[in-house]
Amino acid sequence: MSLLVGLMIHPANLDFYNCQSRHIPMAFEADIVQRHQHLHLCENKYAMQLSLRIDVSKTIKTAFVKFLDAFVDHVFEFIDQPLLPIQSNFAPVDEMRAAVLIKSIEGEIPDDFPEGIYIRNGPNPPFGGFKSTKSLFARSSHIWVEGEGMLHALYFKKAIDGSWTVVYNNRHVETESFELEKQRTRPSFLSAIEGISLAILSAYILNLVRFGAANGYASNTTVFEHSGKFYAIAENYLPQEIDISTLETYDEWNVNAAWNLPFTSHPKRAPESGELVIMGFDAVKPYYVVGIVSADGKILSHKVDLKFNRCCFIHEIGVTEMYNIIMDYPLTIDVKRLLMGGSFMKYQKGGHARIGVMPRYGDADSVQWFEVESHCTLHLVNCFEDGNEASIIPSQCPFSFTQTFQQITHKSVLIRKFDFLWNK
Ligand SMILES: [Fe+2]
């Protein structure tokens, strides 16, 4: 589960060098047509201008980034952030990057236990743990779901004589933002989730301008498989392909450049077709988009904006045989509210909540919405069809979002069932 939310702006969009170099060739080409008799002369002239402009742009960019780095280093201080007692299990562990044999096992592995790999993904902040950032804009803090993802893998192998060999390995998911901080050898992303609005806003903007993202990509929530490939994911960015044997990180997966939005931590495989049903929410429009990826993982066969009028932090999508199950509850993310001095993310107690039943290839107009009591559902336990009835079994969080994550206990989660009759 991750709280990370952000505008997905690639660093290239903020790259002065790239912006300049994209525009020059068109002018260059036009000039060649007009002055074809002096083609070589023009080429040389423009080559010189191009080189000069790129150098100037690079210089400006480098100077600007250095200035911002100096500003952040001077104005912001990263402070170790103690974990609450109930969060001690989330303290970071050292990275191993190599498998070790487990020599001591308490209890016994059952004879009929399957051979295979168990992988867990979770936040594991580098640099010794979470950091608050303190500045003249006040203080902002990390919440425990923000650490960079670490994969923990147990490999179970059974010999002919029935004895078990168990091997353990762990490794960080090496996202672009993880690599960036590793290169800089210090925490670099300012905490942009929890704190007063001015602190959040300044952290948000500085992260965007310096790194092209409001938060690190983390990739710390789950691992899923599609079409024989495995991915680590957190919902503020794209999945990272991983090698489950070595825990090595490969490239991001954007479905052949067709999906450029955040990607749910809990995509679902559609029964029968094997397609992958995905969704993404964002702080800017479109707020909520549903996608269908082909069973072979190569084609985004459907992508539709459900035309939400607000951004909700929606962690999960459900599937039944023929339908996608959409949740809409009042845990909202609002840049305008932040600018007005309010919370960036807020559980609006008593706010509007509904559940939608959407044909697999439907659109905003074909979703049948059912009003439900105000609540927040982060996870779905199950969804299924029975004739004209759909049953949705969500686990609900009755507290505010931040409170839920800081104080979560089993008692804070309710399981309940919604049954809907709808027109097929
Ligand atoms: Fe989750």
Image: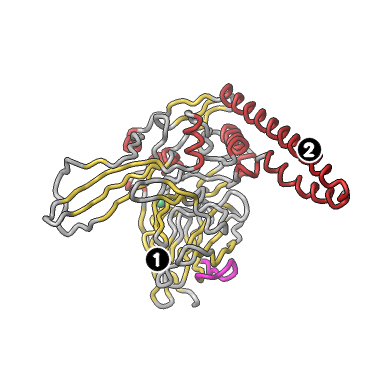
Q: Describe residue 339's horizontal placement relative to residue 113 as left or right.
A: right
**10 Å crowding of disc 1: few (<14), some (14-19), many (20+):** many
Q: Describe residue 177's horizontal placement relative to residue 410 as left or right.
A: right
Which residue lies at the image location 83% right of the left edge and 49% below the top edge?
32
Q: Nearer the viewer, residue 23 or 327?
A: 23
Magenta-drawn segment: 360-369
Which residue lies at the image location 55% right of the left edge and 33% below the top edge?
196
Q: Is residue 42 above or below residue 162?
A: above
What kind of element bears circle 1?
strand
Which residue is denoted by mark 1 in the rendering? 383
Q: Which amino acid lies under the numbered mark 2 shown in the image of this protein?
A: Gln
Give the x, y percent position of residue 102. 21, 42
Q: Nearer the viewer, residue 21 or 346?
A: 21
Q: Is mark 1 within 8 Å of ligand 1?
A: no
In the rendered image, is residue 197 in sight? no
Give the x, y percent position of residue 10. 60, 45
User: Which label belongs to residue 3?
Assistant: none
Q: CA distance from mark 2 to mark 1?
A: 62 Å
Which residue is denoted by mark 2 in the rendering? 49
Give the x, y percent position of residue 309. 61, 56
Which residue lies at the image location 52% right of the left edge and 26% below the top edge?
134
Q: Earlier in the sequence, mark 2 or mark 1?
A: 2
In the rendered image, is residue 378 in sight? yes
